[in-house]
Image (cartoon, rainbow, N blue to C red):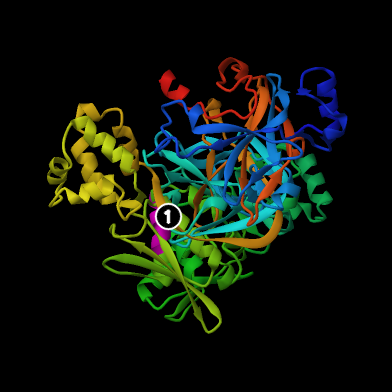
Amino acid sequence: MILSDRDLRQQIKDGRLVIEPFDESAIQPSSIDLRCDNLFRVFANHRQPYIDPKKPVEDLTELVEASEEHPFILHPGEFVLASTREVVTLPNDLVARLEGKSSLGRIGLLIHSSLPGSEPVMLLHQGTMRPTPIEHIVRKKLQGSIAGFDPETFEIGYHEITGWYEGPADRIFEVVLASGRRVRVTAGHNLFTLDRDGRIAKVRTGELRPGMRVAVPRRIPDPSAAEPVIDILGLAPESAYDWLTIEGPSVARAFAEGWPDVSDALRLSGRKHVGFYRSRRRLPLSAARTIPGLCEGLNDDDRVGVRGSARTLPPRLAVDTELAWLLGLFVADGYRRRHHIVVSNTDEVILARAAAVFAALGFPVTHADGRSVTCSSVLLSSIFEWLGVGPGALGKRIPGIVFGWPRALLEAFFEGLIDGDGSRQDTRDSYWSSSDGLTGDVMMLAARLSRRASVCYRDRNGRPAYQVSIPHREHKLLTAVPLPDRLLVELRETTGMTQLDVSKAIGFRTGAGLNNLERSLQRDAVRLATLRRLHRFYAPRRETTEALPRLSRLVEGDLAWDEVREVRDTGTTEPIFDIEVRPGGHKIENFLAGHGGVLVSNTAGFVDAGWSGHLTLELSNVANLPIAIYPGMKIGQLCVFQMSSPAERPYSQTGKYQGQRGPTPSRIHMDFDEE
């Protein structure tokens, strides 16, 4: 829960929230304005050849003092550390979030920002996983988990959402990758790349350049082992309650044990012929929902139907490989009307299989002409609509629940998709579509299947035509890794071997190949196959133990690296949203979002419970002109959130930046000292 201006004043009055110095006018409707101090830390790049996270970096930066007469000038593309003039102190049950002033963001000065509301995030919620707009997650404060990677292992998993944040409007940029993936973010938001030591490095959108490589999923694991079902009543909108019916043992029991309540429910729903429903052990859903516990207690012996039809389905329809295949075929090559479903195809074997699946569900095909099959059913047609297959060819989508299915069902769905509007070759599978949204879904589906995918676009007489290519074997697609040259040097030197020795051992003809990698000559990436060969050579050697895990996660982890093609200013300004992911205090700080799936950061600017000190600001200039930063100017907004319970280990007990004064350089080396 975000604190309002009234609550902020009360917390300050009670001494629980401390802002020093404090100005009453700084309190806004749901935040507190903070000002910039007069000290800045600039990077002295000439002092060290590279940044080693294991060593203190105080001498990497130098303090610069600004004044009203001589403000600090931040040039385009530069990054600097600043700090708030105010000291902020939080109790053990409040956390905070620092965001840049939107008025400064509009001129290109950024602290941190996030995603516009419509960007989809892969959310695991109430047993199903689906792409969900981040605005929907934040505004409804949905409980659930997101797909994100562990920065220590590079493994993608599902991590509980622990906070939600809505910020002021900001300028939106679109990052377009070589595979066709894309994501809309603000210029200050981070994506991920690798540094030269093989460690994760954040890179701001405003600093991305064509050719840089950023993290995307190589594979996304199954979210759970539960058998997937289609919950028909859970999918049905309120507009369907009046013509959907339920019948079976649970309804018969309701009539026998609670006749007065059932009779009242029927009359309140506008039904006069109560005896008709009683004789058939049937109820309209609009009436059944008013009887406590009835709909929740339905089981596989009960049935859901449509008024006027004798054909029914269980309320929770189990998904097997044949139903998954049919749904994939329909997404690719089918359409629906209110009273029927049509699947078209030129292969009679495929049409016969589709007819058999319809029949197994209890809805035989009513028309077949060798080019299509038609199944007449209001119920099935409605279920397909509620699943979210989309209207028409341009709006087709993969139903969101599909992404949470286990691999065997995903394979069946993918088979149906290719049978419908794709092709199979010796080297790759291809899928064609005129729906932009569907191409992003197919690339996400490929990641769930541990397969690589890319998309290309053509204009066919004014109509969009997309081809998604999914190769069978590794070739070029998503197999280049940002070159960790210093890691390769470190590994070789621990063995005491020469470049020539290692080159011969892994199959290089001469030492020149390894020399080019270690010296980063005319390249900024290395093939995954080459890293595998090096990994097989170094893995048995005990002396490489400290550095080997960094190579192992590049080879065996769940991350791939996609090349930036373009960073495009959309010209729009939209409210932005972010989520916090800190399960058990472990910082995940990323989640899967965007068209096709791109890994983006979160929680920048987060202030832990128990914190006390100045707040260090990370300032970037993404404008085309220098920006003057004056001491005392309003630089950010502090939003304060109430925790569900006080922290067991507040930051005051564990934090390495507690009590910091002024802009403080990184102390990440302390993490290695603890290890």
Q: Give coordinates of residue 506: x percent, y percent.
A: 16, 45
Badge 1 density bin: few <14, some 14–19, many ≥20, Cα 10 Å: many
Magenta region, main secondary structure = helix
Q: Give coordinates of residue 521: x percent, y percent.
A: 30, 52
Left or right: residue 505 versus residue 444 is left
Left or right: residue 197 versus residue 239 is left
Question: Would you identify the image quadrant in which residue 503 lies?
Answer: top left
Asked if 155 appears above or below 664 in the picture, the reply is below
Q: Quadrant of the N terminus?
A: top right
Q: Nearer the viewer, residue 618 or 415?
A: 618
Q: Give coordinates of residue 647: x percent, y percent.
A: 63, 19
Residue type indicated by callout 1 = Asp
Q: Which residues are magenta?
A: 408-416
The answer to if 410 sits in the magenta stretch is yes
The answer to if 245 sits in the magenta stretch is no
Q: Which residue is mark 1?
A: 562
Furthest-front residue in this view: 69
Q: Nearer the viewer, residue 376 or 596?
A: 596
Furthest-bottom residue in this view: 461
Q: Give coordinates of residue 396: x percent, y percent.
A: 55, 66
Asked if 583 appears above or below 381 in the picture, the reply is above
Question: Would you identify the image quadrant in which residue 427 lies?
Answer: bottom left
**Residue appearing at x 48%, y 29% in the figure:** 57
Q: Is residue 351 visible?
A: yes
Q: Nearer the viewer, residue 138 or 669?
A: 669
Q: Quadrant of the C terminus?
A: top left
Which type of secondary structure does the marked residue at label 1 adopt? Answer: strand
**Residue appearing at x 57%, y 37% in the figure:** 42
Asked if 23 appears above or below 479 in the picture, the reply is above
